[in-house]
Amino acid sequence: MRTMIDLGSQRDSLYIIDTATAVDCTKDVRFRRSFRSLIECVVPCCGFQLSSNTSDVPDSHSTGGGSTPPTTTVTGTFYGHRRGHVRFCLHDSSRTSPILLLEFTIPTACLAREMRHGLLRVALECDRNRARCSSLFGVPVWSVYCNGRKVGFAIRRRMSEGDAAILKLMRAISVGTGVLPGASKMGEGDILYLRASFERVIGSINSESFHMINPVGCTGQQLSIFLVRS
């Protein structure tokens, strides 16, 4: 039986639920509080405080004059073992196979620290002369920048049996954060995940961006991912 942690109803402590749970995505999810609790669970010793005021953060969707680039909505999932590396995948929906799967060289705890202020910009950059594939989703290696600072690389992967097993456990979850029990040969601990809807903006053949959509009525985490071939 899976052990799920209810991160939406507790502010200071986590309550363990030993029975099967279901996610009702039609209700207004307290996404901001859930995300805050997940980060505090990942990095319990950092002693940071998340900012609850995001009014001074510029809107990542705002654009100047000119035509509006085409947009669609996709599902994005960050997941990884507590003491392992993070993976990120994009799906057309939570029940379909990934159209892109990247493994970051960033440890899960390190990425959580980058999220502590409620604002995260992840830029993936590659050299146009070296990455000659037509689709950005076909680029094999990316340089990764978090909030303007280079933190490592991301490598395109094919979905393994382990990835398939994790994503199968999450098939019924369309939006949410939480912890899944996961066995690891390296003793990397449980599996942490964040799943949300993202607005996909296609700027050109060499640039795309993905902006997390927060549930209605919630300010939530500001999270954007940029793919740029320069």
Image (spheres, helix red, strand yellow):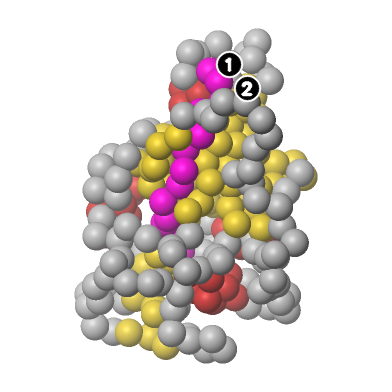
Give the number of the disc on residue 28. Answer: none
The image quarter containing residue 181 is bottom left
Residue at x 38% of width, y 47% of height = 75
Q: Are marks 1 and 2 in contact (CB under 8 Å)?
A: yes
Which is nearer the eye, 154 or 24? Answer: 24
Q: Quadrant of the N terminus?
A: bottom left
Residue lying farthest to the front in this orientation: 65
Residue 72 shows in this picture: yes
Give the residue drawn at x 68%, y 20%.
230
Which of the two residues, 103 or 222, is positioned nearer the viewer here?
222
Residue position for label 2 = 229
Residue under label 1: 131
Residue 102 visible? The answer is no
Q: Which secondary structure dominates the residues rendered in magenta?
A: strand
Does the magenta portion include 204?
yes
Residue 10 x/y as whole percent: 48, 86
* Amino acid bearing label 2: Arg
Q: Which region shows up in magenta? A: 190-205
Please provide percent x and percent y for residue 65: 66, 30
Asked if 27 appears above or below 110 in the picture, the reply is below
Instruction: Judge from the rendering whether residue 97 lies leftward or rightward of residue 75; answer left or right.
Output: left
Residue 87, compared with residue 27, is above or below; it is: above
- The amino acid pointed to by label 1 is Ala
Q: Secondary structure at mark 2?
A: strand
Q: Which secondary structure, mark 1?
A: loop
Q: Quadrant of residue 183?
A: bottom left
